[in-house]
Amino acid sequence: MSDQKPNRKKSVLGRGLGALLEDSPAKHKSEEILPEVVKTGIFEIPLDQIQVNPFQPRVHFDKDALAELAESIKVQGIIQPITVRKLDTDEYQLISGERRFQASKIAGLTQIPAYVRTANDQQMLEMALIENIQRENLNALEIAQSYQRLLAECDLKQEELGDRVGKNRTTVNNYLRLLKLPPTIQSAIRDQQLSMGHARALINIEDVDKQLAIFKKAVDEELSVRNVEALVKALNEGTPEKPSKPELDPVRKYEINKLQQQLASHFGTKVALKSNPKNKGEIKIPFNSASDLNRILEILEII
């Protein structure tokens, strides 16, 4: 019995401090609470391990454009890696590059080169929005919505936002004002039926009905930005000298002016065309000589 006790102590102490720590509950606990160090860099990652970006600012992807990109990827491969963050073992989330990600799946790829970086939710949102604003062909409404999200969800001021996206405060504000337009006009911007220039002109109309009326005319007649600006200017010119006298609707006024220009071009001389809200009026065609009168009469096929 006396020979066994020293041996038992020696076997315990002889294992050393390292061996004791292996069995220490504190050691195992520290292993559990230490976070895994995420390796950053470019890696080939299986596509089925990547989740889409929940903060993606682009909500519509052109199918034909994706198909073209997929064909390019089949031939050239992925030239620029996508960017992801690691969520867990074999689990990643897309930060930027969703078009390349989706096109790679269409092309039949099983893995994709990706730059892995660390980012929390707010950083991820900011990176996704700014990357898309700078690199993707977003329409004006998508840019406006991205700016709004950066202000609201990333707690940025307009000056800070301008610095992040490389735009001055006026430009940022012009985009944000698009979000005040009626849904019908916003849809036209999103579908690229209406340009940013057209939309900026329409913003200056306070009355929604008149705003929609000029918008419809702009789309139906494919008016230029300058023409729309002229319509808006006519609308905002102010009250007439005699308020009791009925005033022409600005859209009708624009039509009369346009017709007057066409008549002047047709007759080769200045033409005065007047009309009232009841569609009554007059046309005056001046002439400078007898021969000029005969020329006008010939155009009218009177002689």
Image (cartoon, rainbow, N blue to C red):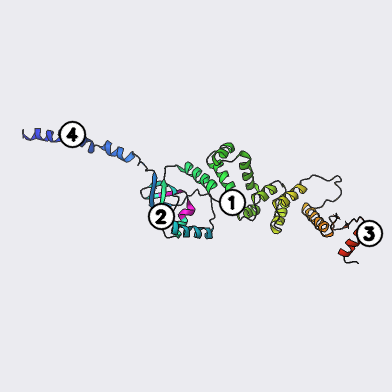
Are there few (<14), some (14-19), or many (20+) residues within 10 Å of tag 2?
some
Q: CA distance from mark 1 to mark 2?
A: 28 Å
Callout 1: few (<14), some (14-19), or many (20+) C-alpha neighbours within 10 Å? some
Q: Give the residue number, with chain letter if any, for mark 4.
A: 16
Q: Position of residue 58 (x, y in %)?
A: 53, 51
Quadrant of the frame with the C terminus: bottom right
Asked whether, in this view, residue 27 is left or right of residue 93, the answer is: left
Q: Give the mark nearer the N terminus: 1 vs 2.
A: 2
What kind of residue is marked 1? Asn
Question: Element type at marker 2?
Answer: helix
Q: Earlier in the sequence, mark 3 or mark 2?
A: 2
The x, y position of residue 53, in whole percent, is 47, 50
Residue underneath mark 3: 290
N-terminal label among 3 and 4: 4
> Is residue 202 found left or right of 191 in the rendered image?
right
* Residue at the spot 38% in from the left edge and 48% down from the top edge: 43
Label 3 Cα neighbours within 10 Å, binned few <14 / some 14-19 / many ≥20: few
* Mark 4 Cα-neighbour bin, 10 Å: few <14, some 14–19, many ≥20: few
Quarter of the rendering containing residue 252: bottom right
Q: Which residues are magenta?
A: 92-101
State the residue position of label 1: 139
- Badge 3 amino acid: Ala
Under mark 2, the amino acid is Leu
